[in-house]
């Protein structure tokens, strides 16, 4: 179960990552954000950003060129 969904389909790097950061900034700790992206760079950029942040990658998947990330907002 996610609290918000951010669809960045069709956007090119670095926009999916920037929009993800902005969305997380407006969320409360513990809330979950689902990010949908079609840019292959997102598969690298979003997990790399999360590894350096207070947020946690709960799940990630790729199906037919669509990348999906579930992120828990950190405190």
Image (tube, rainbow, N blue to C red):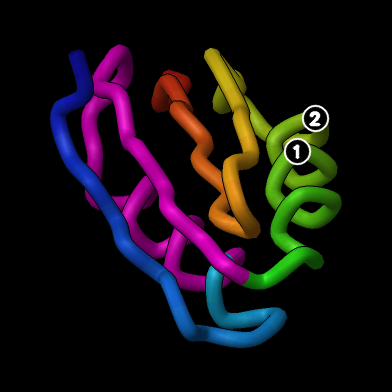
- On the image, the x and y values in percent for residue 11 come to 51, 84
Is residue 39 rendered to the left or right of residue 75? right
**Element assignment for label 1:** helix
The residue at the point 43 percent across, 73 percent down is 9
Comparing 52 with 45, the one in front is 45
**Residue labelled with disc 1:** 47
Q: Is residue 74 above or below residue 61?
A: above
- On the image, the x and y values in percent for residue 59 come to 56, 18
Is residue 6 rendered to the left or right of residue 42? left
Q: Quadrant of residue 61?
A: top right
Q: Is residue 48 above or below residue 61?
A: below
**Residue labelled with disc 2:** 51
- On the image, the x and y values in percent for residue 58 come to 54, 14
- On the image, the x and y values in percent for residue 4 come to 18, 40
Distance between the alpha carbons at the discs numbered 1 and 2: 6 Å
Is residue 21 rendered to the left or right of residue 64? left
Tell me whether circle 1 and circle 2 mark residues in contact (CB < 8 Å): yes
Magenta extent: 17-38
Point out which mark residue 23 bears.
none
Comparing 9 with 4, the one in front is 9
């Amino acid at each position: 179960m996610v609290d918000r969904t951010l669809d960045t389909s069709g956007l090119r790097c670095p926009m999916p990552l920037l929009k993800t950061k902005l969305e997380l900034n407006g969320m409360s700790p513990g809330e979950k954000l689902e990010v949908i992206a079609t840019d292959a760079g997102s598969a690298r950029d979003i997990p790399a950003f999360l590894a350096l942040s207070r947020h946690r990658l709960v799940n990630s998947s790729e199906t037919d060129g669509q990348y999906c990330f579930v992120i828990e907002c950190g405190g």
